[in-house]
Image (cartoon, helix red, strand yellow):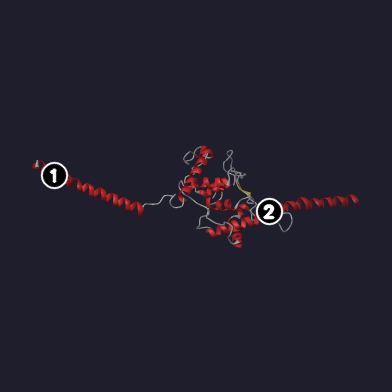
Amino acid sequence: MASLLRTSGTSGSSRLSRLSPYVVVALALAVVGGLYTAFLAPKSGAQTGGGNTDQSLTVKAGSDLYLKGCSTCHGLNLEGGAGGPSLIGVGSASVVFQVESGRMPLANGTVQAPRKDPKYTGEQIDQLAAFVQAHGGGAQLPQGNLTDGDLALGGELFRTNCASCHNFAGAGGALTYGKYAPALDDASARVIYAAMLSGPENMPRFGDGQLSESDKKAITNYVKHVTAAQAPGGNELGRVGPVSEGLLIWVAGIGSLVGVTLWIGNRS
């Protein structure tokens, strides 16, 4: 019996000695995992106030809107298709311009997408913009007030870079092959700024190397100011410059002279 107990004790000690390294390793892994979770692991959105979660929800809402209203032309994965270009990497600014100005969704193919009343609310536009921005990045509108730039500087920059197409007062003008530079009177500050960032239609894209953020804000401020200003000289005649004024002079002025001449002749 004693020999059996000694044999059993010896075999138990032998098994314990064989298991002890594994036990030590398991305990070490548990300790390391606990320390990492406590001090080094990234916190979830719910633990850090929900900022990441809110952004994810915005992107998810934008995805739902995109699938319902945009995917037919632009593809299920923004890859583009027969009816529209790829939207991967175009950025949220392009979405703001196209959707907030009502140009998208496009009812039918035209030489140039016309401005219409927007089909989406401001919140929905931001959701669509966040969804597109999440796929490839791209130009984004800055935060804060977009019209707090220097008004005088904005006028100078607008006349230098924009007036040749949009007219000095933002009244728009004709281009080639049926295209045109649209009037800016109804454009929101976000649409004006986004146009400079995205370069839609025939408009060039102005990077920060050409026009800084403060320059773009100055131009936006000038456009909003000049399109809302009253004409001090009376009827503005469409604000298209000397063409309408010259036409009025010839039609009204010369017509009046001809009428007076005929009246004098009849009196004679």
**Residue at the front extreme of this rendering:** 1
**Three-letter residue code for mark 2:** Arg
Q: In this view, does 259 lie to the left or right of 169?
A: right
**Three-letter residue code for mark 1:** Gly
Distance of label 2 from label 1 (alpha carbons)? 106 Å
Residue 99 at least partly seen: yes
x and y percent of residue 133 in the render? 48, 48
Residue count near mark 2 (Cα–Cα under 10 Å), binned few <14, some 14–19, many ≥20: some
172 or 114, which is in the foreground?
114
* Mark closer to the chain start, 2 or 1: 1
- Tell me the quarter of the picture where residue 103 sits: top right
x and y percent of residue 109 in the render? 57, 39
x and y percent of residue 214 in the render? 54, 60
Q: Which of marks 2 and 1 is in front?
A: 1
43 or 151, which is in the foreground?
43
* Residue 103, numbered label: none
Residue pointed to by mark 2: 239
Q: Which residue is found at the position 51% from the left and 43% from the top?
A: 61
Residue count near mark 1 (Cα–Cα under 10 Å), binned few <14, some 14–19, many ≥20: few
Q: Which residue is found at the position 61% from the left and 62% from the top?
A: 152
State the SS at label 2. Answer: helix
x and y percent of residue 248 in the render? 75, 52
Residue pointed to by mark 1: 9
Q: Which residue is found at the position 55% from the left and 48% from the top?
A: 96
110 or 78, which is in the foreground?
78
Is 9 above or below relative to 222?
Answer: above
Q: Is residue 90 left or right of residue 253?
A: left
50 or 151, which is in the foreground?
50
State the SS at label 1. Answer: helix
Q: In which quarter of the image is the N terminus?
A: top left
